[in-house]
Amino acid sequence: MRKLKKGYIQIYTGNGKGKTTAAIGQVVRAAGFGLKSYLACFMKEFPYSEFESLKKFEGLIKVESFGKDDFVYRREYPKDEELQAIRLGLDKSKDAMIKEKYDLIVLDEICVCHYFKIFSVDEIIDFIKLKPENTELILTGRYCPQELFEYADLITEMKEIKHYYSQGVNARRGIES
Amino acid sequence: MRKLKKGYIQIYTGNGKGKTTAAIGQVVRAAGFGLKSYLACFMKEFPYSEFESLKKFEGLIKVESFGKDDFVYRREYPKDEELQAIRLGLDKSKDAMIKEKYDLIVLDEICVCHYFKIFSVDEIIDFIKLKPENTELILTGRYCPQELFEYADLITEMKEIKHYYSQGVNARRGIES
């Protein structure tokens, strides 16, 4: 089994399209080299088309989904059970990183969870500090808190220059979900 | 077979990591919904780990690689045969779009080809104008010429905030290639 010699911490943030898709591309590339990835998707309900595709990589890519984003549309703080469903994702990601020793761990939309006060910056930093030397860690989501920047080795801001949403185009199956 | 009702033009440019990986993520997501993608990789030599992974999507994702980037390192204009190898990619992409009717066409690093004067802006615009209504077109690469912006429906600038390359980290198999 191939391993990374050294793993880094990557952040994809910003208001433009391409953060989650870059993370998906990254786990797919890693699988092509034989690295094992764990992808924790926060606040995203099935079905997203990528979940269907990534099933092809059984044994190399494991995807789990934690909680929904209904509370955002209701404009209220998540109910206890919703909160627990989302918060479970960080515990499971810890296990994937420490016990199951995945090479690449993705916390997709973790920055959005912080924005909605579901995880504190300190909880995320505590998680980062557990990262083994040869594990790559990717955090995504808009509104990445500045305090995380010093822990990251790579940060890309996906900056929206133009978006078809502003033309009134809705999210499309196969493209956005 | 599923089809898009309407296809748009997306551009991923900028100096940060995540442009090609976002395009890979996009074709993988599209495949999960049953859409067919053609991915033309310009100036990228095999093996990239993603090429290995994408073989799993036979019949849904077709990847072809056109030319190398050796001339960049030699600091000279590409030789005729190198130029032809790269230029062939646009003809093959035209066929994929018009004759083979793929739902999603990715021209990966086409903007870099323009930067190195391998394709003119007009050649790329002529290509764009051929796009059928229900085809999605994605162009990637740094140095996207401003003239293409008006043709795009979505533009994300992947902006480097921090990169481990500046810490002296080299490209790693499974992560960058």
Image: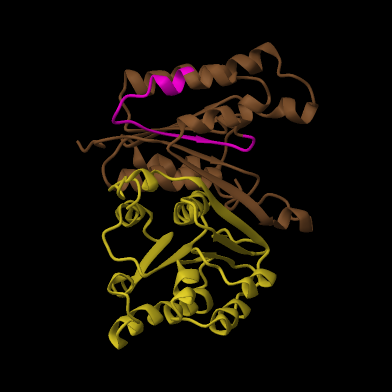
Chain colours: A yellow, B brown
Q: Is residue B79 magenta?
A: no
- Residue at image position (29%, 47%) is A172
Residue A23 pos. (x, y %)? 49, 56
Query: Which residue is more in the foreground, A35 or A25?
Result: A25
The span picked out in magenta is: B126-143
Q: Residue furthest bottom?
A: A80
Q: In the picture shown, does residue B103 fall above or below B34?
A: above
State the count of labels: 0
Report x, y in % for residue B118. Answer: 63, 19
- Picture residue at 67% right of the left edge, 57% below the top: B161
> Does B147 sit above or below residue A17?
above
Q: What residue lies at 34% left-to-right and 19% top-to-bottom?
A: B98
Above or below, B84 relative to B153: above
Report if residue B134 lies within the magenta region. yes
Give residue A152's position: percent from left, percent from top: 65, 67
State the image quarter where residue A58 is shown. Answer: bottom left
